[in-house]
Each structure stands twice: as C-alpha cells, then as structure tokens.
Amino acid sequence: MAITKLDDLLKIKNERKMKLAVVSAQDKEVLEAVVEAMRLGIIDPILIGNMEKIEDMLKKFGFNLEEFNIINEKDLGKAAEIGVKLVSRGEADFLMKGIVDTATLMKAVLNKEWGLRTESLLSHIMVYEIDTYPKLIYLTDGGMNLYPDLEQKIKIIENGVQVAKAMGNETVKVACLAAKEIKDPKMPATMDAYEITRKYQEGYFEDGIIIDGPVALDLAVSKKSANIKGYKSEVAGDADILLVPNIEMGNGIGKSITYFAGGKSAGIIMGAKVPVVLTSRADTHESKLYSIALGSIIAEKITN
C-alpha cells in the first residue's frame, strides 16, 4: 500500500536499522533530526566531523556520548571522503549532508576511484504532503539540474519513479510539465515532453509507469480543471510525479507549496549507488527528519 502521509515514514521499521553516515555533523538542526531518527529506531548514525563541537551539542541535548559513533575530521572535504568511503566499503547504507557545502559532498560522491557514481544522473526529488491533494506529490528536479536535456529528463523520471515505488506506489503517474498541451518549437519544454510521452507509448519505460505531456500544472493536479477544459488523460488530476523542465519552475513550485500552502516535505538525491539526504538550512526540523526516514526506506530497498 502506498504511503500517503509523511508521518507514516516514521512508523516504518526496516528489517535492520540503516546506517547513516552524516558528513560534517556539527550542525544543531541536522544533529537533532538525526538523534530523533535514531531514537525512533529508523537509523544507526555515524557522525563525521568536528568531534569537539558534535560532543558539545550532544551534551547540551542531554545525551550519553557512549551511544554515538563519532569520527573526528574537521576538514570538510576529508569528512565527505570518509562518509563516501564508508558507504563504498559497506559500512554505511546512505549519506546525509551536514554543514558541508553541496559541491564538496557531490565531488566526493562522484569520485571515479572510490565514489558512488552510476550510469544514472544525480537528481533531486522532493516529496510533498499538501492538505488539498489526496496523495503525496513527487517534484523533480528543482534542486540540482538547471536545464536538463531530453536524455537527462528521462533519467530524472527514472530516479523519481524509484522513489515513488519505494514508497509503495505500484503505478506511478508522471506529468511532464509545460505551459500548454501541444508541442511548440518556440517552447522547448513542450518538445521534450512530447518526445518523452512518445517514448512511453512505444514501451521505452518499465512497467508500472504512465506518462503524459506536455501538460500544464493545473491539468496535472486538478480533475476539475481537466474536466472543464475537456482534457482526457490517465494522469490528469492524479499525477504522482511532476517533471519540471528547469530548476526555476521546480524551485518556484516547491517553495510555493511550502510557503503558500503550508506543505510538509522530504527531500532526497537519487542517481548514486545510495540515496543522499540533502536538506536546506531553511528546512524545518520536521522536514529533515522526514528526509532521513525517506532515505532509510530507499536505502533498504536498494540493499535488498
């Protein structure tokens, strides 16, 4: 059964607790979310970073330091290398970004010798819970890829589908967003969406995926709008994944959900050998906790 509420992520117990390597863990908000996830039995954390600062924060939280596995490394680049190598050796199941900048962490993840690169593309998936929508919505990619081309968009869809299926969705409906529903050479988003839909119709994608596009946002998420406009589609008003044509649209939709609609969220980077939990400093404690739980579920699916 598909997960429809982010709170349900916190109730799922894997066969074993996933080991989470937290890179540069000396961040109060990140550390609080990690500790709570540990207390809920979701993860077994490995804290990499400035040991003095990490221990000081843990003491202020009132925790016993003996409960934690802490690796002392003040250098952000070296901390990222340690985290990635722990995963490469099978000593950790997935990664989380602490105060290290994204570029430094991704450089380690993509290292050709000991990194976690695959033939896929790294992409960011946000999972949103909104009171006005009957299920979770998966938005991609509003965080990593600026202006993906056709081939990259296909890989972004595949990453998003992997997340949606890990969340229990047997059938995943993908809306390739654009400003209108017909292809127009002056609007590249419509051309790419048309080609992706054509490939879907020709059987390019795995079973359990339904793709439609180009399609405007209102038709993708509102059955009422689709009925009024006479738009017929299996995806219309029932989309799971919103594929955006560029980072501006993804960023705008995502922040609108958060700040205008009060949506809850979890975020993850896919495309590496394991999921990478990457949250914004502006994200709530709740969002960070949900993101860790999401990463744990995906990591468990991958390792099995």
Image (cartoon, rainbow, N blue to C red):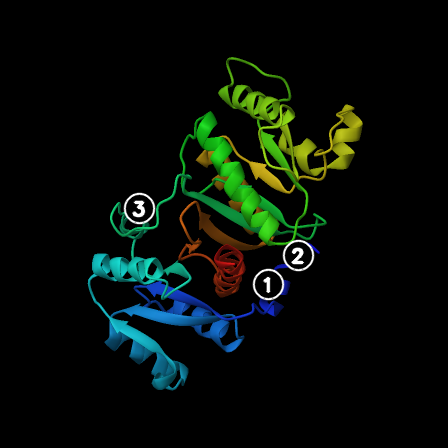
Image vertical order of residue 189 relative to residue 44, above or below = above
Identify which residue is drawn at 36% across, 70% down. Answer: 46
Residue 81: horizontal and vertical position, in percent? 25, 58
Earlier sequence position, callout 3 versus callout 2: 2
Residue 277: horizontal and vertical position, in percent? 43, 56
Q: Quadrant of the N terminus?
A: bottom right
Answer with the quarter of the image where residue 279 lies.
bottom left
Earlier sequence position, callout 2 versus callout 1: 2
| Residue 109 visible in the displayed image | yes
Evaluate if marks 3 and 2 touch, with contact meaning CB atoms under 8 Å apart. Answer: no
Depth-wise, is mark 3 or mark 1 nearer the camera?
3
Residue 215 shown left or right of residue 290 in the figure: right
Marker disc for residue 110: 3
Q: Which residue is mark 2?
A: 3
Marker disc for residue 63: none
Work out how far the residue at label 2 is from the one at label 1, CA to CA, in angstroms. Answer: 8 Å
**Crowding near the residue tagged with mark 3, few <14, some 14–19, many ≥20 C-alpha atoms within 10 Å:** some
Residue 43: horizontal and vertical position, in percent? 47, 70
Q: Which residue is mark 1?
A: 9
Asked whether 101 or 203 is in front, the reply is 203
